[in-house]
Image (tube, rainbow, N blue to C red):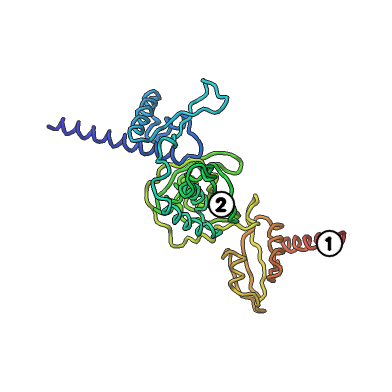
């Protein structure tokens, strides 16, 4: 009896491992912005492969593709134009044969949803804009039917005009995965390309989201570095299935991680101080400073803003751009010198003109 129970337990555990592996494979393929190579899949222990026996992992991968096909999810091999037979295989989900065609909902329903999506897109600062654009293109196809320009995947620009995109592709799927992880407070692992093109894998507790200069940024606890880090959404190339819950700490404020022009530079940050006249409203000062740094009142009625900067010249230029709001450099002297230099160049350029 004990032998039978042990055998049944082992069988159940094996089925659970298989189901989890298939689910992980589906998630990573569905959220990837590009097809994944065989090596990326069968060497990944987090997916459920990555054993010392590569031949066994290849067989598991083949069986897992067959299991997905049984449920109507078709994983196909793709080759780039000009690729040779010896080049490594790459795999993706065949979306044309996997997902339901248009017509699942009525045109009237699609039109109602389209109006709701357009209302959301009319707002400038929404972190899930790219995902909504992908949804919108599909709704347009439903409302206008085959043979119209909607079949080309019409989407709307941020200024309200139409443009024609084939699909938002993997970038939209990655955005969906990241947003879902944030909404559910689940840790998510993803592949990330930094500004230099180097790829790394990160696991992030997403504590906050913000948009700046047309890009969406996710902020949270990065497992690899052990610190709070910010990642740009369009540099995420694929995501793994979210797992493990977390709680956002009460001290976290996403405004502390918004970028200002003087943040983008190498080297250490140093303190810089600026002043605002007392006649300038509190709301305007907060809008300029993004709630960053520290504000204090001086005895002459002015407000002193202290913030860390990495680029003194960019900080001086930032103050100059808000000079009409009475923003002036205060310290250190290098900041004041950069301010005077910028004014001098502007005056000289105006005189030459």
Q: Which residue ends up furthest to the top in the rendered image?
A: 85
Identity of the residue drawn at 68% across and 69% down: 327
The answer to whether residue 80 is above or below residue 19 is: above
Residue 333 vs residue 117: left or right?
right
In depth, the one of 105 and 1 nearer the eye is 105
Residue 178 position in % (x across, y down): 46, 48
Identity of the residue drawn at 49% across and 34% down: 35
Please tell me how crowded label 1 is: few (under 14), some (14-19), or many (20+) other residues with Cα within 10 Å. Answer: few
Residue 200 vs residue 8: left or right?
right
Q: Which residue is mark 1?
A: 350
Residue 175 position in % (x across, y down): 48, 48
Figure label count: 2
In depth, the one of 190 and 28 nearer the eye is 28
Residue 290 position in % (x across, y down): 58, 64
Earlier in the chain: of badge 2 and badge 1, it is 2
Q: Which mark is residue 156?
A: 2
Q: Secondary structure at mark 2?
A: strand
Q: Secondary structure at mark 1?
A: helix
């Amino acid at each position: 009896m004990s032998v039978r129970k042990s055998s049944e337990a082992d069988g159940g555990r094996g089925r659970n491992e298989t189901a989890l592996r298939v689910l992980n494979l589906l998630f990573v393929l569905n959220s990837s912005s590009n097809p994944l190579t065989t090596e990326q899949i069968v060497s990944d222990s987090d997916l459920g492969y990555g054993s010392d026996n590569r031949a066994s992992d290849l067989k598991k991968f083949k069986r897992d593709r067959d299991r997905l096909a049984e449920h109507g999810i078709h994983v196909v091999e793709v080759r780039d134009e000009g690729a040779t037979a010896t080049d490594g295989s790459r795999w993706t989900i065949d979306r044309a044969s996997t997902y339901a065609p248009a017509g699942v909902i009525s045109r009237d329903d699609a039109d109602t949803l389209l109006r709701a999506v357009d209302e959301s897109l009319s707002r400038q600062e929404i972190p899930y804009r790219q995902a909504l654009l992908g949804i919108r293109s599909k709704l347009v196809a439903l409302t206008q039917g085959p043979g119209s320009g909607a079949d080309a995947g019409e989407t709307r620009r941020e200024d309200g005009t139409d443009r024609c995109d084939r699909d938002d592709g993997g970038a939209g799927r990655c955005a969906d995965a990241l947003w879902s992880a944030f909404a559910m407070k689940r840790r998510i692992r993803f592949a990330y390309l930094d500004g230099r093109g180097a790829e790394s894998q990160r696991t992030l507790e997403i504590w906050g989201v913000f948009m700046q200069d047309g890009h969406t940024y996710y902020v949270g606890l990065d497992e690899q570095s052990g610190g709070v880090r910010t990642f740009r959404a369009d540099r995420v190339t694929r995501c793994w299935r979210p797992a493990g819950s977390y709680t956002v700490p009460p001290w976290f404020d996403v405004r502390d991680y918004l970028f200002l022009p003087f943040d983008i530079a190498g080297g250490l940050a140093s303190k810089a101080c600026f002043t605002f006249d007392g006649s300038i409203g509190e709301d305007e000062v907060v809008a300029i400073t993004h709630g960053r740094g520290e504000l204090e009142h001086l005895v002459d009625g002015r407000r002193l803003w202290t913030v860390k900067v990495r680029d003194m010249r960019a900080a001086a230029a930032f103050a100059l751009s808000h000079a009409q709001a009475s923003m002036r450099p205060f310290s250190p002297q290098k900041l004041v010198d950069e301010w005077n230099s910028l004014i001098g160049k502007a005056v000289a350029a105006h005189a030459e003109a």
